[in-house]
Amino acid sequence: MARMHTRRRGQSGSDKPVTDEPPEWSDVDADDIEARVVELAEQGYEPSQIGMKLRDEGVTGTPVPDVKLATGKKVTEILDEHDAGSDLPEDLRNLMERAIRLREHMDENPQDFQNKRALQNTESKVRRLVAYYRGDELDADFTYSYDEAVELLD
């Protein structure tokens, strides 16, 4: 499949192995995993970072290869249950941060046309994601603007 804002095709990534149960070498209790997920969220880690930390460090020294297999819930579901989730989805937050950085760069360097195009592409992605999340995870009348993004992320 082709990329959205270029003419190139991307490299294919790896697929997760198809399995319904965690491996036998990972025998961590689901409650311990949930407690560790909430603890990492309170330390300021995002859901993707939490998954990587659990994969690499684990709970009490035992790695957790897949949180959903071990607990039956995704990391974001666990965070929502314990009211530790953020107000914005992680992908939208990251794109907004990038758009803010690019906008500040464009204010300092108005002749940088490559980054002007990158800003347009990023803001386009943000608007599409806002339309996707509107009503479910965002307010029904939420619209993206630079000022709104700065206000939300500060």
Image (tube, grey):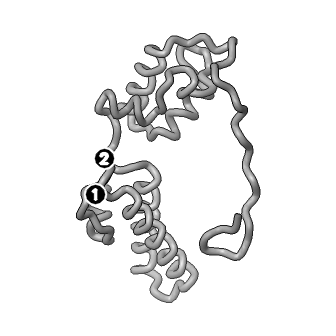
**Above or below — where is 150 with respect to 103?**
above
For the N terminus, the quadrant is bottom right
Give the quarter of the image for residue 35: top left
Mark 2 near mark 1, Cβ–Cβ under 8 Å?
Answer: yes
Residue 106 at x, y = what percent?
44, 79
Residue 85 at x, y = what percent?
34, 38
Which residue is identified by label 2?
Answer: 87
* Residue in view at x 52 percent, y 40 percent: 48
For badge 1, the amino acid type reads: Leu
Residue 93 at x, y = what percent?
40, 55
Q: Nearer the viewer, residue 102 or 17?
A: 17
Q: Which of label 2 and label 1 is nearer to you?
A: 2
Q: Is residue 108 visible?
A: yes
Question: Disc 2 and disc 1: Cα gap in Å?
Answer: 9 Å
Q: Nearer the viewer, residue 74 or 63?
A: 74
Give the quarter of the image for residue 142: bottom left
* Residue in view at x 54 percent, y 33 percent: 51
